[in-house]
């Protein structure tokens, strides 16, 4: 019983907790971003073709872009799942559990090269994902403006003056200026505001934005852990020292 307990203690003491937390956060963030983002794009397409444009040619380019983004989402989910597993394995590689279970720890040239490669890839992905994170805020901003307009209309006494409130996606570049009707005002806008599809799409974009933020935090955590692990392999590999990062 004591031997089993000691073995568990050794494994837990060498657990790469930062890499483990980053992996869980990465999987959670990517799941939210990809799943909710895919459904939010579908809901946006449905709202545009139902209320803001009667001619498919007006938003055909946007539909093509939405479909491309949805396919990119599939690839993004698969890539980050694989990359998260690889980074977690790299974290385990440089922990004290490796030294205590398999003997004396020796950093090979291949191990150092792998750690340096992961550092470069993680920095590169972090920069790219920072752009993705910023872009994911744009639909949230657009839907927030529309939601604010809906709240302002609902606050009017007896619905007076609702005809003065409009929503025009053309001003955001979502639709061309030749699209008809293009903008929706008054009671037609109230009808959109009361649709569950609108509120669902808005909250899906918010959730996707939150998932993008969680993924960015996980990548930053990966950056710190991989850099620290490389420093251990590069400078302290010959000493009786090992990382728990």
Image (spheres, grey):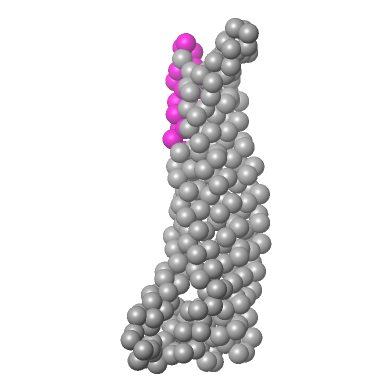
Q: Quadrant of residue 140?
A: bottom left
In magenta segment, residue 31: no
Q: Nearer the viewer, residue 229 or 44?
A: 44
Say above or below: 245 vs 3.
Answer: below
Say above or below: 75 vs 39.
Answer: above
Say above or below: 127 vs 101.
Answer: below
Q: Nearer the viewer, residue 18 or 177?
A: 18
- Magenta segment: 223-240
- Identify the image quadrant of the N terminus: top right
Magenta: main secondary structure: helix
Could one spot residue 56 in this view of the protein? yes
- Provide residue 175's location: percent of width, then percent of height: 52, 82
In magenta segment, residue 225: yes
Q: Residue at x 52, y 33 (%)?
A: 19
- Provide residue 154's location: percent of width, then percent of height: 39, 81
Q: Residue at x 46, y 90 (%)?
A: 187
- Provide residue 161's location: percent of width, then percent of height: 35, 91
Q: Quadrant of residue 186?
A: bottom left
Q: Would residue 134 appear left or right of 29 to someone viewing this image? A: left
Could one spot residue 113 in this view of the protein? no
Q: Residue at x 62, y 70 (%)?
A: 42
């Amino acid at each position: 019983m004591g031997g089993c307990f000691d073995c568990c203690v050794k494994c837990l003491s060498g657990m790469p907790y930062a890499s483990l937390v980053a992996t869980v956060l990465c999987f959670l963030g990517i799941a939210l971003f990809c799943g909710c983002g895919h459904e939010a794009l579908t809901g946006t397409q449905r709202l545009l073709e139902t209320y803001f444009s009667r001619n498919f040619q007006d938003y055909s380019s946007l539909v093509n872009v939405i479909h491309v983004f949805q396919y990119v989402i599939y690839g993004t989910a698969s890539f980050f799942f694989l990359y998260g597993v690889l980074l977690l394995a790299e974290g385990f590689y440089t922990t004290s559990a490796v030294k205590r279970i398999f003997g004396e720890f020796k950093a090979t040239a291949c191990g150092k090269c792998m750690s340096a490669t992961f550092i470069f890839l993680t920095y590169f992905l972090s920069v790219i994902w920072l752009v993705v994170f910023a872009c994911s805020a744009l639909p949230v901003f657009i839907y927030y403006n529309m939601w604010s307009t809906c709240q302002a209309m609902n606050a009017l006494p007896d619905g007076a003056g609702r005809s003065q409130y409009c929503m025009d996606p053309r001003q955001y570049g979502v639709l061309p200026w030749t699209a008809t009707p293009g903008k929706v005002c008054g009671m037609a806008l109230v009808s959109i505001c009361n649709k569950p599809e609108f509120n669902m799409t808005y909250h899906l974009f918010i959730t996707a934005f939150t998932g993008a933020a969680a993924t960015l935090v996980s990548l930053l955590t990966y950056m710190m852990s991989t850099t620290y692990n490389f420093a251990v392999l590069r400078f302290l590999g010959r000493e009786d020292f090992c990382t728990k990062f």
